[in-house]
Image (spheres, grey):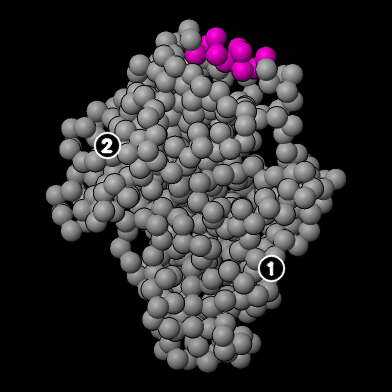
Amino acid sequence: MTVSTEQVVETLKDFLEESQVSINQTVRELHGKDESYHKISLPDIVVFPKTAEEVSKIMNVANNLKVAVVPFGRGSSLEGHVIPYEKGITIDFSLMDKILEVRANDLLVKVQPGVTRTQLNKELKKYGLFFSVDPGADATLGGMAATNASGTTTVKYGVMRDQVRDLEVVLADGTIIHTGNLAAKSASGFHLNGLFVGSEGTLGCFTELTLKVYGIPEFTTAARAVFPTVKNAVEAVTSILQAGIPIARVELVDESSIRQVNRFSETAYAEKPTLFLEFDGNEAGLKQDVEFTQEIMEDHGCMEIQFETDNTARTKLWDARHNLAYAYIHGNVGKKMMVTDVCVPISELADAVIYARTELDSIGLIGGVLGHVGDGNFHALLMIDMNNPEEVAKADEFNEKIVQYALERDGTCTGEHGVGIGKQKYQAAEHGAALQVMEKIKVALDPNNILNPNKIVKIESLGE
């Protein structure tokens, strides 16, 4: 910071209330980390705006004083996105948590960035609607747009970028813009929604989002299917997709992870590669889809299949997948979780998962492999003693190997967690000359490099 913290605080208090500006140590510590294993770094100041106009003024001050700014939702990111390594100001959007408008007839909703997906779905239920993206954590919608989040429902409904109709964005100099409109399609101008979604706070701060929503399906069925090998399971999914069955969720959990689930949840599932599936739609059509799916899975060696239509039973079945991270954490007290994240073409997925599992076994660390196999995205969970340099080095080497494996097959280093600080080193290998285009966009929109500096792309540091 080129000016003193005290000077910045006094300038901010010209238009923010005392309670909206904090230099409290505990508050700063809460904003100096996320859910990842990356090194903690505290901001100098945390601010809590209530309006887009206040965000605009904050950005104007920061830009004039050349102070770094990091937008912050709930801190549930997994690659160090919100960690302020250049110190400066963290903008916490928790006070901007209003659902501004539900346009039920347009299947749209307008929200502030601090609204969480659970909060939104609770409100939408009154209208017979729901928001589709489910990254697991109860993240804020602003944060989910910033990282282009996805999750278990992507195979049917798409990623966060597919749901964004319009964004209100505050740029580095305080200018407020809109990136879209309410129309279902447009051939006018550059696709700014696509540019800003996934930009991880490096191009602007989101202060309002207009999102697509969907009617709650009439009927839902969940299933758990056990296979002798990962290859059998993934090939079954490929056949289901090729058959055009509109599956809503399909998740793979390997045998090591099922073992961990059984210990944590006191279940007795077969400790074999397992698919967790969900189908939704009208009851008559769904019955045919389920029957066809069952035939396909049996053709691929399915050993056991269990269907559930009751809501309580479906929830219990899916708890095994949703609580997997907690199962590992509670079962390995004192260790920190590293979550890897790559995505490959569907045809490459089975071999990629087998490769990851083999490499994980070879390094002797506790962990499992799971994935959103309907879209080629998979993760490895590793439990690491962060005070043990050998374990940390093994985990980093493992991560590097599966990223390189994905890139060599024309995949990506991150399917849904984003780049942040953890995946930055792979950007040149993945994007080639296109990375220079990204750098030029960053410089054009943020010439002083104040917005979440040195995340995704690296340009000149502040003050240089």
Taking depth in this image into account, of 415 and 274 the one nearest to the observer is: 274
Real-space CA distance between mark 1 and mark 2, rounded to the nearest whole angstrom: 42 Å
Horizontal relation, residue 210 to residue 71: left or right: right
Instruction: Kindly indicate the quadrant of the structure image that contains residue 138.
Output: bottom right
Residue 108 on the magenta span = no
Foreground mark, 1 or 2, reads: 2
Number of numbered callouts drawn: 2
Horizontal relation, residue 221 to residue 430: left or right: right
Looking at the rendered image, the quarter that the C terminus falls into is: bottom left
Residue 20: percent from the left, percent from the top? 57, 82
What residue is at 43 percent from the left and 33 percent from the top? 371
N-terminal-most mark, 1 or 2: 1
Instruction: Name which residue type carries label 2.
Output: Lys
Instruction: Kindly indicate the quadrant of the structure image that contains residue 44.
Output: bottom left
Instruction: Name which residue type carries label 1.
Output: Ile
What residue is at 74 percent from the left and 32 percent from the top? 218
Q: Which residue is mark 1?
A: 176
Binning the other alpha carbons within 10 Å of mark 1 as few (below 14), some (14 to 19) or many (20 upward) gives some
Which circle marks residue 401 in the picture?
Answer: 2
In the image, is residue 435 above or below residue 343?
A: below
Question: Can residue 373 be seen here?
Answer: no
Binning the other alpha carbons within 10 Å of mark 2 as few (below 14), some (14 to 19) or many (20 upward) gives some
For the stretch drawn in magenta, the main secondary structure is: helix
Q: Which residues are magenta?
A: 288-297
What residue is at 39 percent from the left and 53 percent from the top? 79
